[in-house]
Image (cartoon, rainbow, N blue to C red):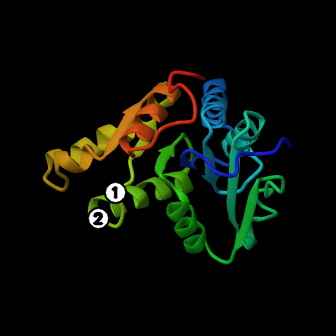
């Protein structure tokens, strides 16, 4: 592994699946995310797994010269095949400790396609933001319309008075990884280490 920049320009916390899914665009999107983070002098913090989209985004970040911080509970080290060549790998006791460390290390949050674990992490970060526990930008990468049904369900909640428009406005939704990442880093008041239009 090449030496990594010890002082990243920004840190992106990525939530995504420990499986690849059944469509090639999911993997391609994870690769684009990793390449963008690495090419712009950034750091990835994620769930520490070596499989699925998690492993893909971590590998491509490292290959592009970025730092990778993995955080994984001991109980999942074998199940999710911990990625031992992360720049930093933290093995913690609980899922709560995992999510807390990931959130603390993050400048921005980005959610890719995944399953119920990914959904839970995304909604928790969103809930923390609306409650004022953090003010870090949140992004949802809507690969191939993956999150369109979920967003429509949330609009149903809004129409029935359980949510407000300002809560919906806390999440940036886009289907273009580079554009979404650039906007999140900018919203955090940070500058990438290279041209933001670079892949």
Counting other residues with Cα less than 10 Å from the Cα at mark 2, is it few (<14), some (14-19), or many (20 or more)? few
Query: In which quadrant of the rendered view does residue 37 lie?
Result: top right
Instruction: Kindly give the residue lying farthest to the bottom in the view shown.
Output: 93
* Residue at the image point whose x is 82% and y is 63% from the top: 78
Quadrant location, the C terminus: top right
Name the spot of residue 67 as percent of width and height, x first.
70, 47
Name the spot of residue 177 as percent of width and height, x first.
52, 29
Q: Which residue is mark 1?
A: 135
* Residue at the image point whose x is 57% and y is 29% from the top: 194
Quadrant location, the N terminus: top right
Counting other residues with Cα less than 10 Å from the Cα at mark 1, is it few (<14), some (14-19), or many (20 or more)? some
Name the spot of residue 173 as percent of width and height, x first.
38, 35
Q: 99 left or right of 127? A: right
Q: Which residue is mark 2?
A: 132
Q: 54 left or right of 124? A: right
Q: Secondary structure at mark 2?
A: loop
Q: 79 left or right of 107? A: right
Nearer to me, 130 or 11: 11
Instruction: Kindly give the residue lying farthest to the right in the view shown.
Output: 1
Name the spot of residue 90 as percent of width and height, x first.
72, 67
Nearer to me, 36 or 15: 36
For residue 140, above or below residue 104: above
Query: In which quadrant of the rendered view does residue 139 lie?
Result: top left
Q: CA distance from mark 1 to mark 2?
A: 7 Å
Numbered-mark total: 2
For residue 88, above or below residue 137: below
Q: Secondary structure at mark 1?
A: loop
Question: Given contact means CB atoms under 8 Å apart, are the residues at marks 1 and 2 in contact?
Answer: yes
For residue 28, above or below residue 171: above
* Residue at the image point whose x is 14% and y is 50% from the top: 160
* Residue at the image point whose x is 77% and y is 35% from the top: 63
């Amino acid at each position: 592994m090449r030496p990594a920049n010890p002082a990243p320009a920004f840190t992106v916390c990525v939530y995504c699946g420990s499986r690849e899914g059944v469509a090639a665009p999911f993997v391609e999107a994870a690769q684009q995310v990793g390449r963008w983070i690495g090419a712009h002098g950034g750091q990835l913090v994620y769930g520490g797994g070596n499989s699925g989209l998690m492993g893909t985004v971590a590998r491509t970040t490292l290959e592009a010269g970025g730092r990778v911080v993995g955080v994984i509970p001991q109980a999942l080290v074998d199940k999710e095949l911990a990625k031992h060549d992360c720049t930093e790998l933290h093995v913690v006791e609980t899922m709560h400790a995992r999510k807390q460390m990931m959130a603390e290390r993050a400048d921005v949050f980005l959610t890719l396609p995944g399953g119920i674990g990914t959904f839970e992490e995304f909604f928790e970060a969103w809930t923390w933001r609306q409650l004022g526990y953090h003010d870090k930008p949140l992004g949802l990468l809507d690969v191939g319309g993956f999150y369109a049904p979920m967003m429509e369900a949330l609009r149903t909640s809004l129409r029935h008075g359980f949510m407000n428009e300002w809560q919906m406005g806390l999440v940036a939704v886009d289907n273009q990884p580079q554009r979404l990442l650039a906007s999140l880093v900018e919203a955090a008041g940070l500058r990438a280490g290279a041209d933001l239009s670079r892949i």
